[in-house]
Amino acid sequence: MTRAMYPGTFDPITNGHLDIIDRASGMFDTLLVAVAGKGDKNTQFSLRVRKRLVLESTKGVPNVEVITLSGLLAEEARKLDIDVVVRGLRAVSDFEYEMMMALMNRKLYPKFETIFLMPSLRYIYLHSSVVREVAALGGDVSDLAPPAVVKALAERASR
């Protein structure tokens, strides 16, 4: 049985993330979507809310499981006996950071491999921060994020 992990803060999950999830879930028997705690990012949504939004957004993908991640990715992968992590690359600027992280993770856990997937062309520009900003300024994000996220962002903007 092949299992892989797709980690991220998912603050919030976007249609670009779902594109990667959909495609990666076809490559593995099980894809664990790991919603990471804050790390070095100042998240807008709590870990609990982000996990709920990922769960709601992926409920139609049968081989996806959603977990939370609080420590080192390599250590969590080792504990869960997962050797493959999936990461999305939108642009060349993402590559340098992701390459360094992949090499560090392999140093921490030698069996660890990283697979990079590029999103579909229509999502290549999409960042969670852009979705949050457009929604906060009253813009329509229904083409950018799943319905649960669109609703959560609208509720947040109305406060």
Image: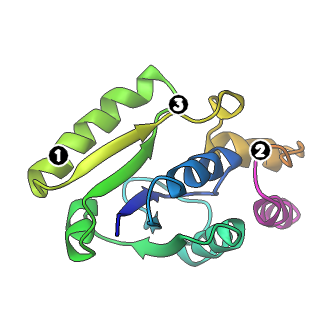
Q: Is residue 137 above or below residue 2?
A: above
Residue located beneath label 3 in the image: 90
Is 114 part of what is drawn in magenta? no
Residue at the far top: name it: 92
Which residue is tagged 2?
Answer: 144
Of the two numbered discs 2 and 1 on the same chain, state the one appearing first in sequence: 1
Q: What type is the residue that disc 2 sits on?
A: Leu
Check disc 2 and report its element: helix, strand or loop: loop
Residue at image position (40%, 49%) is 86
Kind of residue at badge 1:
Met
Q: Nearer the viewer, residue 61 or 128?
A: 61
Q: Quadrant of residue 39?
A: bottom left
Counting the numbered discs, the total is: 3
**Residue occupying image coordinates x 57% and y 78%:** 48
Amino acid at the residue labelled 3 = Arg
157 in magenta = yes
Q: What's the CA distance linking mark 3 and mark 1?
A: 21 Å
